[in-house]
């Protein structure tokens, strides 16, 4: 009997199984990829001794490292030299930033160990040898034996590549927080301490520390004690792994994957549960007499209930099996994509049996809960009542008939409207099911709309410069005039960035306070409504996300501990909050920042607009300028964003759109087939009474058209609400996604559902044409 029911309803069963498979596929893809990344990260960090605590200094003697080792909770300490330099790569005209990190001369580093991909280790007795990061090597096609040049302490030096390596410190290679990855314009290089330290007058000293903590150690206490030790040596404030740039980006990615695994499949499971409820409820109505006969023969209500539960579970298991296979395949592809961005020695997709068990349990629970009401009606149906046919519907006059306009409409149209009005709950539920498919289609394309808007907002309206130049040390404001003399420079605006720790109560954040001119045009502050934010004469302007993390509001006074220069500590009022989409930022008027630092008109860097025809001449000049620590091209940042963050998210969105299309088709097809099954006898009666096939089809498909027409605007509204929930779920400290949905997305969702309705209508029309009038009229329906 179970198999017979499944075969009879095979169309609806397959459609529902596909909906479940879509949810399962998303769940398996996201969770298994999440588990693969998490396991690879944790294994890599442990085997290669990734540090727990980091700090930068100006210059400290090696003896300080011994004092740090004595701190309670500190296990291992790695003292090193780390500097930013300008690189000159043959065949590449744009400026390149290099980060040089020293390696111990006599032994392998105790922390942040390298994984050699190709080549060999450095021989400290040979001058100019270096190991480069794999991402940088692949971006430029560099191999062991090749060479490049670097401006090391104002001197141009040739470096010979002897190896290509990975480091747990640079799983995601990026210059600093808030920057974008660009493997062509930023590279990490390792050199021997013997060669690098003397070049910067750090022989017998260091300017960077990495610490590994003992199990159970208090990180906050170690950070506090470390800051006390390093302050006199220019320490800029120690921070834990959570604020290390590469580790932070990877953690945020894992968080977004976890959110995707929780939010999107929930929608699919909810719709599948809704469809199962409708199908089982219809099956129970058809089989009233069979249920009565079975109970009369001695079968208990539990046997009846178990029969329908097994019906639901078989469809669910089919969907879970199919979804697991598809999800595993998509997850493997997604893992390969992540391998292009996150550099691990090994990153293998792992199909976790625990995930499969969890998704099976969740899917079965959702299906059983969805069908519970229908199954309960079958269990509680008394045999004597079941033997009688269902009471007929209340056929009272409709609103149109009471208004006297029914005579103006064709008979088929009146039948459609009567059926919808007299069964409002059924029509409403059917419309809600289709509306959910519209909503999922909207959500599937929301990510692309948000990213497009985010790019336009960030790179066209806020950051309008062509080039950003950073200086090795804060430089007097007269540098603006010098920059204007460089070839191709048309406009210059200086900025001051000061490293600081912001405290409010027991919460704190390390960041760089950005000092901007009030009339700045190349880097503007805009709120979420794209209105210009005027920097006040005094006080701070914080991003709303930063204020949320500090549990602060506009008007509150927070403590600013400067981590450079004379390291002043000030109590400053939050003048305003700004809703932005990238990072956690703090801004001041540049004059106020100078006063806080007790300095003159110093600049940390400058924003430039450049004549495109003379850009290459400018880049060549900047490469030879010793005081320039780094050059960032706006066009390169945009390309980097598209090739990394945007591509990664849009790949996930592509999978979601595919699943959303399956959901839309599955829902609409189910509604059409259920409507045909429920009204088969009625339609056959009308055929016998002389209605043509076209009129019969118009009655059936007219209902579907009305339900679909009502569902589309409702679904668009639901989709907007779900997008808002997803925007909140995907929010991180790095990025916030604006709630922006284009008219093209709304149109796409509507068109897909309309096409699905048309396709389903054609399939149902074929079934109508094939109705066996005699057989149908002999049935209960």
Image (cartoon, rainbow, N blue to C red):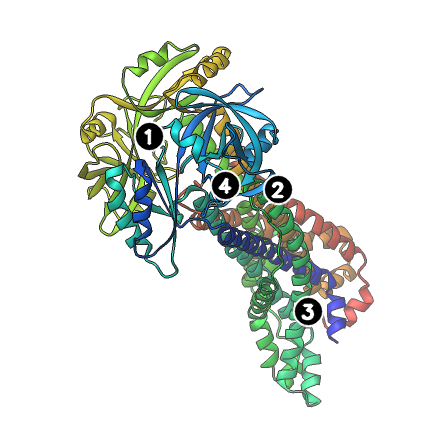
* Residue at 39% in and 12% down: 490
Residue that badge 3 annotates = 314
Instruction: Tell me the mark number nearer the camera, choosing from 4 and 2.
Output: 4
Q: Circle 1 sits in a helix, a strand or a loop, which is it?
A: loop
Q: Dot 1: within a 10 Å radius of its alpha carbon, few (fewer than 14), some, or many (20 or more) residues?
A: many
What secondary structure is marked by label 2?
Answer: helix
Q: Which residue is mark 4?
A: 172
Q: Nearer the viewer, mark 2 or mark 1?
A: 1
- Classed neighbour count for the residue bearing mark 3: other residues with Cα under 10 Å, few (<14), some (14–19), many (≥20): some
Task: Say whether disc 4 or disc 2 marks the residue closer to the N-terminus.
Answer: 4
Is tag 3's residue or tag 2's residue first in the polypeptide sequence? 3
Q: Are marks 4 and 2 in contact (CB under 8 Å)?
A: no
- Between discs 4 and 3, the one toward the N terminus: 4
Left or right: 519 as drawn, with respect to 284: left
Residue tagged 2? 751
Cα–Cα span, label 4 and label 2? 40 Å
Q: Earlier in the sequence, mark 2 or mark 1?
A: 1
The image position of residue 6, as x and y in percent, is 73, 68
- Residue 270 appears at what percent x and percent y? 55, 60
CA gap between label 3 and label 2 equals 32 Å
Q: Is residue 252 visible?
A: yes
- How far is mark 1 from mark 3, CA to CA? 57 Å
Q: Which mark is residue 525?
A: 1
Distance CA(mark 4)–CA(mark 1): 28 Å
């Amino acid at each position: 009997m179970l198999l017979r029911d499944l075969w009879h309803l095979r169309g609806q069963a397959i459609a529902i199984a596909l909906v479940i498979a879509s949810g399962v596929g998303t769940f398996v893809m996201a969770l298994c990829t999440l588990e693969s990344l998490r396991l690879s990260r944790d294994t890599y960090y442990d085997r290669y001794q990734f540090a727990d605590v980091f700090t930068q200094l100006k210059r400290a003697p090696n003896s300080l490292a011994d004092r740090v080792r004595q701190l309670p909770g500190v296990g291992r300490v790695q003292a090193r030299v780390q500097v930013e330099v300008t690189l000159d790569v043959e065949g590449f005209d744009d400026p390149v930033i290099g980060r040089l990190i020293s390696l111990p001369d006599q032994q392998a580093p105790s922390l942040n160990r390298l994984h050699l991909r190709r080549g060999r280790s450095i021989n400290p007795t040979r001058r100019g040898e270096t190991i480069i990061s794999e991402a940088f090597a692949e971006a430029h096609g560099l191999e062991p034996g090749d060479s490049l040049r670097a401006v090391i302490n104002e001197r141009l030096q040739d470096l010979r590549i002897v190896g290509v390596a990975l480091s747990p410190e640079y799983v995601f290679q990026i210059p600093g927080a808030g920057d974008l990855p660009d493997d062509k314009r930023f590279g990490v290089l390792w050199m021997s301490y013997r060669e690098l330290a003397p070049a910067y007058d750090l022989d017998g000293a260091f300017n960077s520390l990495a610490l590994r903590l003992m199990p159970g150690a208090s990180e906050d206490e170690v950070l506090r004690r470390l800051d006390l030790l390093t302050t006199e040596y220019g320490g800029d404030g120690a921070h834990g792994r959570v604020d290390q740039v590469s580790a932070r980006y990877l953690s945020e990615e894992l968080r977004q994957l976890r959110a995707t695994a929780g939010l999107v499949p929930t929608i699919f499971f909810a719709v599948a549960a809704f469809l199962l409820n409708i199908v089982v409820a219809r099956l129970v109505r058809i089989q009233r007499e069979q249920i009565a006969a079975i109970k009369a023969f001695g079968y208990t209500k539990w046997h009846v209930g178990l029969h329908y539960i097994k019906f639901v579970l078989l469809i669910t298991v089919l969907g879970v099996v199919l979804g697991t296979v598809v999800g595993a395949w998509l997850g493997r592809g997604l893992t390969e994509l992540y391998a292009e961005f996150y550099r691990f020695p090994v990153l293998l997709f792992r199909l976790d049996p625990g995930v499969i068990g969890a998704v099976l349990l969740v899917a079965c629970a959702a299906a059983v809960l969805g069908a519970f009401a229908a199954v309960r009606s079958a269990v509680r149906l008394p045999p004597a009542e079941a033997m009688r046919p269902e009471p007929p519907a209340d056929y009272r006059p409709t609103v149109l008939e009471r208004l006297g306009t029914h005579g103006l409409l064709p008979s088929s149209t009146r039948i459609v409207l009567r059926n919808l009005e007299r069964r409002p709950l059924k029509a409403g539920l059917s419309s809600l099911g289709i509306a959910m498919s519209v909503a999922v289609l909207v959500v599937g394309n929301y990510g692309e709309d948000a990213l497009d808007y985010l790019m336009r907002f960030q790179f066209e309206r806020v950051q309008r410069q062509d080039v950003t130049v950073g200086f090795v040390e804060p430089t007097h404001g007269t540098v603006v005039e010098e920059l204007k003399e460089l070839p191709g420079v048309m406009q210059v605006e200086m900025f001051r960035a000061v490293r600081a720790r912001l405290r409010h109560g027991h919460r704190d954040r390390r960041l760089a306070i950005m000092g901007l001119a009030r009339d700045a045009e190349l880097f503007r502050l805009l709120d979420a409504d794209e209105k210009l934010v005027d920097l006040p004469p005094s006080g701070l302007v914080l991003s709303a996300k930063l204020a949320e993390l500090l549990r602060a509001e506009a008007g509150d006074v927070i403590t600013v501990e400067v981590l450079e220069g004379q390291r002043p500590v000030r109590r400053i009022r939050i003048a305003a909050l700004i809703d932005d989409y990238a990072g956690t930022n703090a801004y001041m008027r540049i004059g106020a920042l100078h006063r806080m630092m007790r300095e003159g008109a110093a600049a940390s860097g400058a924003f430039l607009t450049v004549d495109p025809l003379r850009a290459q001449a400018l880049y060549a000049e900047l490469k030879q300028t010793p005081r320039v620590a780094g050059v960032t091209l706006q066009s390169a940042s945009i390309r980097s964003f598209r090739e990394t963050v945007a591509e990664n998210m849009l790949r996930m969105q592509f999978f979601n759109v595919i699943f959303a299309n399956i959901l839309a088709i599955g829902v609409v097809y189910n509604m059409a087939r259920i409507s045909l099954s429920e009204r088969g006898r009625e339609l056959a009666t009308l055929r016998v009474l002389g209605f043509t096939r076209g009129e019969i089809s118009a009655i059936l498909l007219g209902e579907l058209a009305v339900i679909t027409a009502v569902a589309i605007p409702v679904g668009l509204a639901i989709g907007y609400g779900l997008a808002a929930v997803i925007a909140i779920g995907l929010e991180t400290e790095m990025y916030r996604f604006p709630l922006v949905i284009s008219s093209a997305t709304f149109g796409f969702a509507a068109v897909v559902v309309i096409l699905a309705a048309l396709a389903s209508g054609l399939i149902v029309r074929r079934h109508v044409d094939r109705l066996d009038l005699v057989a149908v009229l002999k049935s209960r329906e």
